[in-house]
Image (cartoon, rainbow, N blue to C red):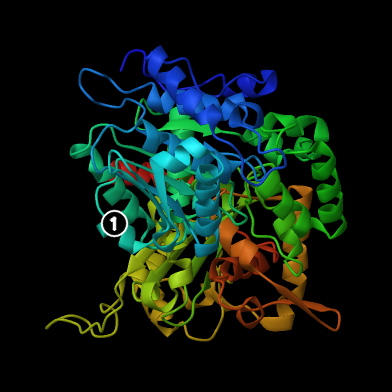
């Protein structure tokens, strides 16, 4: 892969200096120049004066055009830059540039009857893309002779080669629409949660086996929700290649985003307009600083939620939490309370006592478990969580399936198959028939109990409703009944809700930085009843908050200043395990 490395470990310096995010590649200079020349001669049909792209487009995108069309090996017919992932904020001519790129592909193509695709996530975006393509052809007399625009079919046909550029929505029909010599998907972030996205992308990329010059481009803004599903997977893969964490020439990453430190820093340097040009490559062309400044002021005036939404779309700030106006106030401090790399084992080693919170509901709910430990010496509280759900939730709650699959890959969430459990002949009918979720919850509690970290009394906090199976599983493992405590719910949790937010803000409550927990916390909506603050499943709607309720249950018990059941300590427990091994 010598010479074709797409890694850009100096990408932050490139942003600061205004250099291209496309690395130096051993391109066919003549082919690259020809493609750029064709791209440049196209005109913008919806801009006064009908300017050519040589004047209206930025070099940042022209470099992408050069890379794609200058990477075709004339001897083997293999294209070396066969995939590009572009992350760029709104108003940077994504759709227009994408339309021009695909027209360039149609004009350069040598394959008879080749098929090209330009896909929008919605019909509206696909229509905008088609109007851009059709408009570029209509205002150029030479192109109008060479290309036939068919409005009723939303495609453009090359009159000599018979090649066709089809503009349509991205859905399951795309996978059966033929082998594409080249395709571009606009605004992929809107498809991140669609269950079919991965499958259709795989079908599109499968064309490479038959069409060696095929290529695919994804161009998108950041999501206005925490990235999920296929969008998150594609973005993470592009970042890994860019950072050099993965040695791959699968996708050329062109990511206009601030480094993470600038996005999460408490002083929020992304708010400083002096930094906006770093992620706005078309500034001065399709993007005006005056308009950006006005739009930002308007968004900021509407509150934190509107400001962050604006930032996600115009500065590619990644939303870590789905903020809303009636959110739990603790969400504002959640991200900065993360302790990277902290695990349950690490928590157990660092703490002298732990409490456990458990919350679950019906078959369309999650079963959430959170462990809070009190750190030795500092007496800070450290939290870790996990959740389970019956596989039937895939059908009952389709809107959150992509998030759950992401959490499953992270190891923080488990799908289980809840079924009738009938003890086998000779088994104890009272203690052996457990489903996997209940068994895993009980096993985690048993680990903590054997380590001597659970208090003798009130160490496991639960909602008293609907936990019979868990109580049976704990009893089967000889967890003392007095260690289990019912935590009052509803308005009686108000003090805990406020107390947890305060400890997050002052830094005395930390957590493992798990996406599962961040998601559950961001889903919570609050309601005031008199002087009490409520977080309930009814108020929060279809969004899942079970892991957060489990956190609050554990928080309630830790607030009682518990002491461990014995002083054997985790070190002795670990030593005993090693001895047994």
Residue under numbered circle 1: 175
Residue 361 locus on image (x, y percent): 48, 80
Q: Quadrant of residue 430?
A: bottom left
At a point 44% along the width and 64% down the height, the residue shown is 445
In the image, 534: left or right of 226?
A: right
Residue 317 locus on image (x, y percent): 66, 44
In depth, the one of 340 and 29 nearer the eye is 29
Q: Secondary structure at mark 1?
A: helix
At a point 48% along the width and 67% down the height, the residue shown is 400
Could you tell me which quadrant the C terminus lies in?
Answer: top left
Whether residue 472 is visible, yes or no, is: yes
Residue 371 lies, with reference to residue 44, above or below; the image says below
Residue 380 lies, with reference to residue 538, above or below; the image says above
At a point 70% along the width and 66% down the height, the residue shown is 560
Q: Crowding near pointer 1: few (<14 within 10 Å), some, many (20+)?
A: some
Residue lying at the far left in this picture: please name it: 425
Residue 238 locus on image (x, y percent): 45, 36
In depth, the one of 178 and 350 nearer the eye is 178
In depth, the one of 533 and 45 nearer the eye is 45
How many numbered discs sit on the rendered protein? 1
At a point 42% along the width and 41% down the height, the residue shown is 145
Could you tell me which quadrant the N terminus lies in?
Answer: top left
Whether residue 244 is visible, yes or no, is: no
In depth, the one of 71 and 515 nearer the eye is 71
Residue 232 locus on image (x, y percent): 48, 48
């Amino acid at each position: 892969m010598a010479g074709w490395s797409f890694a850009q470990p100096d990408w932050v310096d490139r942003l600061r200096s205004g250099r291209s995010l496309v690395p130096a590649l051993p391109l066919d200079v003549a082919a690259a120049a020809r493609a750029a020349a064709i791209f440049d001669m196209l005109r913008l049909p919806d801009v006064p004066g009908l300017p050519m792209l040589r004047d209206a487009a930025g070099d940042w995108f022209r470099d992408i055009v050069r890379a794609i069309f200058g990477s075709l090996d004339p001897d083997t017919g293999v294209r070396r830059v066969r995939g590009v992932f572009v992350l760029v904020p709104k108003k940077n001519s994504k759709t227009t540039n994408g339309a021009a790129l695909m027209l360039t592909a149609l004009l350069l193509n040598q394959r008879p009857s080749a098929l090209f695709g330009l896909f929008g996530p919605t019909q509206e975006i696909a229509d905008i893309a088609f109007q851009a393509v059709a408009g570029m052809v209509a205002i150029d007399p030479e192109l109008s002779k060479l290309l036939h625009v068919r409005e009723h079919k939303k495609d453009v046909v090359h009159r000599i080669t018979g090649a066709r550029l089809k503009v349509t929505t991205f859905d399951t029909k795309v996978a059966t629409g033929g082998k594409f010599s080249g395709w571009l998907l606009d605004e992929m972030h809107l498809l991140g949660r669609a269950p079919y996205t991965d499958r259709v992308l795989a079908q599109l990329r499968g064309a490479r086996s038959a069409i060696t010059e095929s290529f695919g481009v994804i161009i998108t803004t950041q999501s206005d929700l925490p990235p999920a599903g296929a969008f998150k997977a594609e973005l993470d893969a592009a970042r890994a290649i860019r950072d050099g964490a993965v040695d791959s020439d699968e996708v050329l990453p062109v990511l206009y985003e601030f480094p993470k430190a600038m996005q999460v820093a408490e002083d929020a340097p992304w708010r400083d307009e002096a930094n906006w040009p770093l992620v706005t490559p078309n500034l001065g062309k399709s993007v005006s600083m005056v308009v950006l400044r006005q739009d930002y002021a308007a968004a900021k005036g509407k509150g934190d939620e509107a400001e962050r939404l604006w930032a996600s779309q115009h500065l590619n700030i990644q939303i870590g939490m789905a903020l809303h106006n009636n959110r739990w106030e603790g969400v504002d401090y959640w991200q900065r309370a993360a302790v990277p790399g902290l695990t349950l084992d690490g928590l157990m080693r660092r703490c002298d006592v732990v409490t456990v919170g458990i919350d679950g509901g019906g078959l369309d709910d999650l079963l959430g478990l959170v462990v809070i430990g009190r750190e030795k010496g500092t007496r800070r509280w450290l939290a870790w969580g996990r959740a389970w759900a019956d596989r039937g939730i895939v059908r009952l709650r389709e809107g959150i399936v992509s998030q759950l699959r992401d959490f499953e890959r992270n190891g923080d969430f488990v799908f289980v198959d809840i079924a009738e459990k009938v003890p086998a002949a000779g088994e104890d009918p009272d203690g052996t028939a457990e489903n996997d979720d209940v068994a895993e919850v009980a096993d985690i509690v048993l680990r903590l109990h054997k380590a001597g970290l659970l208090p003798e009394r009130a160490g496991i906090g639960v909602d008293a409703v609907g936990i019979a199976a868990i109580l049976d599983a704990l009893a089967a493992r000889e967890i003392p009944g007095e260690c289990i405590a019912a935590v009052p719910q509803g308005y009686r949790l108000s003090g805990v809700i406020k107390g947890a937010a305060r400890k997050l803000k002052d830094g005395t409550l930390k957590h493992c930085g798990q996406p599962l927990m961040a998601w559950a916390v961001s889903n919570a909506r609050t309601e005031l009843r008199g002087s009490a603050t409520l977080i309930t499943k009814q108020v929060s709607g279809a969004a899942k908050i079970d892991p957060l309720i489990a956190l609050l249950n554990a928080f309630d018990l830790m607030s009682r200043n518990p002491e461990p059941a014995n002083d054997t300590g985790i070190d002795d427990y670990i030593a005993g395990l090693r001895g047994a091994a």
